[in-house]
Image (cartoon, rainbow, N blue to C red):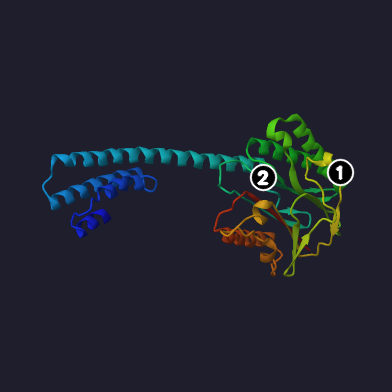
Amino acid sequence: MSAFVLDLSIAGSVNVFPVLAAAPGVAAPILSLLGTIATGVAANIAGLALVHLEREPARDDLVPFTSLIVLTVVAAVFNVLLTRDRRQLRTSREVAAAVQRAVLPDPPRRAGRLAVASRYEVAHEEAAIGGDLFAVHETPHGVRILLADVRGKGLQAVRTVNALLGAFREACDHRPDLPGVVRQLETRMQTGTAQATGSEAESFATAVVAELPPDSSTLCVANRGHAASLLVHNGKVSPLEPATPSLPLGLGALGDDDVPVDRFDLPVGATLVLFTDGINEARDADGVFFDPAVVLSRPFPPDPDAVLDALLAAVLRHTGGKLQDDAALLAVTLTE
């Protein structure tokens, strides 16, 4: 239509056929198949109308109109291929999400005196399954918590995530102390990499392993190269930084066998927030990293779901509605 108006306004002094020819090509990635064909037909009709308004049709007009028909057919084929690829990508993402849910079930809503909330946000940059994981288990030794981020994506990540979750469940039942749990996770990672080849043999996982004893007296945290968890209470945020840095799981052979454990007070009503780097490394259009501590520095009800909802809403606003990497979030609130 714009080409038709343009040609009339300049009284045929300029050839607008290239604009008409471009119409179906522009429509192909945007419109449906029917819309693409309709655009090509409309371009042909507009061209014919312009010819009749300006002069008598001639034999030379067959070439441009035949070309426009061919371009419409090519655009229709392109539209069909694009639609098929989009459908396949959507199916792949749905399969990836289903596998993710099967491998990583939601933790219980309550564990001891802890109210629990979790979220898993997929970044849709690709249809690969991510390596983020979390787990919460109530044991005779207290409530034990794991949040980790495995290097890589795809089947390699699935195998490692599954191995870590299995090792964590077993360690929770049989290890009486938190260092023992971490050592079992480290052993499982090293065993997996020793049996692997290629990039999987170089796999590792940053992790936070925490424990709240049955008397809920002190929160014990072992941080293995992961971003510090945040303690949210009465409008204040306290990063639970480890006193002694530790290597990620799978790289323990490069250091010693010591497992540093930090201890923190967990007041009633306080919420512990753990997250993977899809949150704290999320960037806005200017490349500025998201700071979760700023968002959580306001009063929240003693409700882990409310805390995670506010955090996710803020990070999506920061990034324009789309994460650059998968993100796993876990929040636990100590109740009366």
Cα separation, mark 2 vs mark 1, equals 24 Å
Residue depicted at 21% across the width and 48% down the height: 47
The quarter of the rendered structure image containing the C terminus is: bottom right
Report the residue marked by disc 2.
Answer: 105
Q: Residue at x 62, y 60 (%)?
A: 288
Quadrant location, the N terminus: bottom left
Amino acid type, callout 1: Gly
Q: Residue furthest left?
A: 56
Residue 155: where, in percent of width, then height? 64, 35
Q: Residue at x 35, y 37 (%)?
A: 77
Crowdedness of circle 2 by 10 Å Cα count: few (<14), some, many (20+)? few
- Look at the image and tell me whether residue 76 can be seen: yes
Residue 318, how many percent across, how many down? 59, 61
Query: Observer-nearest residue: 241 or 181?
Result: 241
Residue named by callout 1: 180
Quarter residue 163 falls in: top right
Crowding at dot 1, Cα within 10 Å, few <14 / some 14-19 / many 20+, comes out as some
Element type at mark 2: loop
Q: Is residue 334 above or below residue 32?
A: below
Q: Is residue 163 left or right of residue 180?
A: left
Query: On the picture, is 154 further left or further right than 31?
Result: right
